[in-house]
Amino acid sequence: MATNYETHEYDVLVIGAGGAGLRAAIEASAAGVKVGLICKSLLGKAHTVMAEGGMAAAMGNVDDRDNWKVHFADTMRGGQYVNNWRMAELHAKEAPARVHELEAWGAVFDRTKDGKILQRNFGGHKYPRLAHVGDRTGLEMIRTLQDHGIHQGITVHMEYTVVALLKDGDRVAGAFGYDRERGRFRIFKAKAVVVCTGGLGRAYKITTNSWEGTGDGVSLAYHAGAELLDMEFIQFHPTGMVWPPSVQGLLITEAVRGEGGVLRNKDGKRFMFDDIPDNYKSQTSTDPEEGWRYTQGDKNAKRPPELLTRDHVARCIMREVKAGRGSPHGGVFLDICWIKEKIPNAAEHIKKKLPSMYHQFMQLANLDITKEPMEIGPTTHYAMGGIRVEGETQATNIPGLFAAGECAAGLHGANRLGGNSLSDLIVFGKRAGEFAAKFAKENSASQINDAQVEAAAREALAPFERGAKTGATADGPYQVQHELQEMMQKLVGIVRREDEMKQALDGLGKLYEREKQVAVYGHREYNPGWHTAIDLKHLLTISEAITRAALDRKESRGGHFREDFPDKDPAAAKYNSVISKGADGLMQLRREPIPPMREDLKQVIEEMK
């Protein structure tokens, strides 16, 4: 019986302890409810620590022309107007207060000469807007939130994997999972659950995401009946490490370009000048001197083309590689050392502004970025799509289930601007925690269904039973995962075509069948093969959702580029792709009209043009 499993009971259960999860837990606890926090690895190792460049907030500390309206318009334009405009409004208005709150809690930001929080330029932002701590901003955010959170009475369960969300009728009742160290099952009973599990980049071969980014939360919510939104929009960050192979895909922060780094092909040419979109021509410089002045905070200079939106930069890089103008290992060059022509002591300047990048290349590639250019190429980075949430409250369509951060969709539309992710975490993490606590206070305790728990336990343990029956003849989870990643990279990557995506759907069907036969061996304690087998179901689910949504959107927009439909379709700017699980258990997709924007916000966008 399920009652034999150790049970933990909370008012609000938060799954995921990155920026969004910690901020949600802090806010819920501050509302006076009992809060539990589950994380897949150790506390402090969340992928948020890898966010380097900064958090976007229109504080106007470096350029006083900046305000929430400009930030809102930039976010909507970057997202190609399929964003949840209410989320974009709330984010732009509330981000400065959330940054100042972090500062009050002990975050040590870089400073202007007069002591204000320093802000840097970043792709797609009209003015210098990113509050930062060198190139280690995410690490400082996590440190600050953890230091503040430990005084709030939050119970933390480290190194746990959730295998199913539990329901009581239509509403959420909690979660069922196991501790990764010993393999013991646990029941987490809760009145409200907040999913903050981050990204899904591990569906692809080349990614900036850590081993944890397997789309767990998106898949768990989908299988529990939640709707997914705009899963076709995947951001390929233009600058990941290319060489050596052991570091392929590792992130090179956009801050390198924000501090003056330029992109060159094998002939040394700055190729980004060749393709500046019409809607950015008024803001973008074709004069290298002016671009350099912009990166140094000159209010009157235009931005360099290297700071155009990430989807555009990634495609320009791929164009150079495909044309045979790439670097020796299939990328292009990112050059920050050229600034020695501009400033004295350039090497010390680079080490001060980009300490993590300097050490990353020295230690992993034996390359000194103050003397040599970096070899870079696009890498799967971020999911704009995810769990569909209501803008004000972060509630899903399942009563009691909330989501925030990268696993929740809406704010970023078709393409996220750099720096909007960290401010997204704290703005909507706070809101999710606030409204989850409110739901918990207004509703009685839910009931745990023993049959649901036992079914989840049986499914989780099935790979061991198959291992016992088949010996060493069955597929292992690593082989299936590897083939999935190779297939998604090749067929549903940066450039997409209908025939290739249909081929991917066929391939997914076969991989689903193989996943049902995957076997693991040994026992439940310290068993990484078992953990991988559990992740595999999530990776297949999100890969199918990405592929189906990408097949249906017959246009190119933001992070979704169709070689067979290279232009935008004005009609497609009026709908979002919504995916749900049908009564037959199959994935269903529908197009849903985007609600008309409020007139005052339309006016803001017109003014900012």
Image: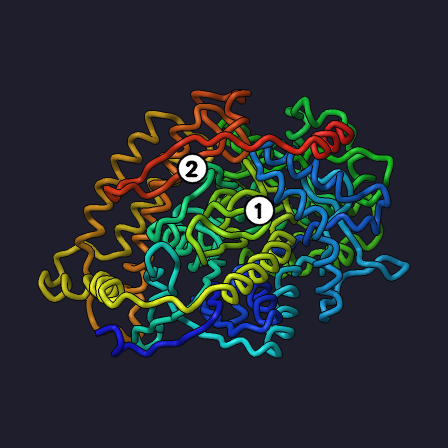
Q: Amino acid at mark 1?
A: Gly
Report if residue 381 is visible in the image.
no
Q: Amino acid at mark 2?
A: Val
| Residue carrying label 2 | 578
Q: Nearer the viewer, residue 444 or 236?
A: 444
How dense is the environment of label 2, judged by Cα within 10 Å: few (below 14), some, or many (20 and up)?
Answer: many
**Which residue is found at the position 53% from the left and 54% from the top?**
404
In this rendering, is residue 445 above or below 535? below
Q: Nearer the viewer, residue 515 or 495?
A: 515
Q: Are marks 2 and 1 in contact (CB under 8 Å)?
A: no
Relative image position of residue 357 (x, y in whole percent): 63, 56
Residue 49's quadrant in the figure? bottom right
| Residue 7 in the figure: left or right of residue 245 | left
In this rendering, is residue 492 above or below 121? above
**Which residue is found at the position 52% from the left and 35% from the top?**
559
Sequence-first disc among 2 and 1: 1
**Which residue is found at the position 54% from the left and 75% from the top?**
154
Give SS at disc 1: loop
| Residue carrying label 1 | 391
In this rendering, is residue 30 above or below 504? below
Relative image position of residue 226 (x, y in whole percent): 40, 48
Q: Nearer the viewer, residue 276 or 247?
A: 276
Task: Check residue 463 in the rendering and tell me which mark sits there, or answer none.
Answer: none
How dense is the environment of label 1, judged by Cα within 10 Å: few (below 14), some, or many (20 and up)?
Answer: many
**Colouring of the image:** rainbow
**Which residue is found at the position 60% from the left and 57% from the top?**
431
